[in-house]
Image (spheres, grey):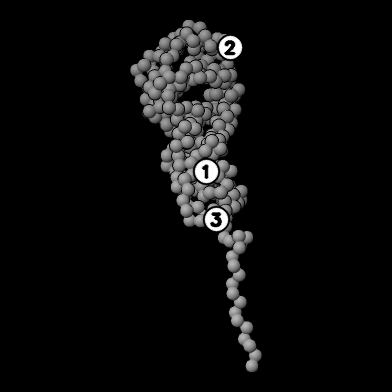
Amino acid sequence: MRAIPEPALPEAVTSDTAAKPHYRGHRDRLRQRFLSRGPEALDDYELLELLLFSAFTQADVKPLAKELLAVCGTLWEVVSAPPAKLRKVSVCVTKPDGGQRRLTMTDTAIAAVTIVGAAALRMTRQQVLNRPVLSSWKTLLEYCEGSMAHEATEQFRLLFLDRKNVLIADEVQQRGTVDHTPVYPREVVKRALELGASALILVHNHPSGDPTPSRADIEMTKQIAAAAQALGLTVHDHLIIGRGKHASFRSMGLL
């Protein structure tokens, strides 16, 4: 009688054959989708995931990416947020062994995210600097909004133009509080003459998000326009930057 061999027992799972954490395959798929189909194929949180991969090599960063958007609001607000705000963002994520760990925005993660905002802002600035401003007004507005819309305090910016309305300088003259910035018409005009400018565009932000000009804004603009006119300088406009919107003194008939 022939002996029937017993069925082979399954091989023990070794560390080499053990299942990898689920986020490993997710990372590869996300990168390939980005490379093959472009950024339009990814949601905002997925773009943030790509940025966070280099900072967290052994963790599922999807919850952290979603939390960043929940805290900041939009993708742009995440990449342009101050480090102090990002440093407070943290979430609990599941480890490969089923345990929990807290994932917090480190300096490496903050740099990985905010460098994108810095690069985008610099490229937008390069698109308007040394070019005729009035023919690229939309790009100028995008630059001003990107630079100032999410500032926690007011800042007063001056855009200096030459005779052909080419932007020759962009400077923040004053920084103030959450609702006030001291502006001195004499200093504005003096700086324009130092740079050899022929015209100006005034820009300041309202941290409240509402770009409606205040009585003080209107009075200050009149003073600067009068001082500039006396020296042959033109004030083309005064822009107030809010969150997602702006006000133009020229369009409103205030200048």
Say whether residue 226 is left or right of residue 128: left
Q: Nearer the viewer, residue 117 or 131?
A: 117
Q: Residue at 59% of width from left, 72% of height from top?
A: 10
Furthest residue toward right: 2
Classify 114 as above or below 169: below
Res 165 seen here: no
Q: Residue 48 — which label? A: 1
Q: Residue at 47% of width from left, 48% of height from top?
A: 101
Of the two numbered discs 1 and 2 on the same chain, state the one appearing first in sequence: 1
Residue hosting label 3: 21
Classify mark 2: residues with Cα within 10 Å, few (<14), some (14-19) or many (20+).
some
Give the amino acid at mark 2.
Gly
Point out residue 37 in the picture as x, y percentages from the top left corner.
58, 50
Of the two numbered discs 3 and 1 on the same chain, state the one appearing first in sequence: 3
Assess whether mark 2 and mark 1 are in contact (beta carbons under 8 angstroms).
no
Q: Residue 196 — which label? A: 2
Assess whether mark 1 and mark 3 are in contact (beta carbons under 8 angstroms).
no
Give the amino acid at mark 3.
Pro
Point out residue 120 in the picture as x, y percentages from the top left corner.
56, 33
- For the residues marked 1 and 2, what is the alpha-carbon distance in whole angstroms? 43 Å
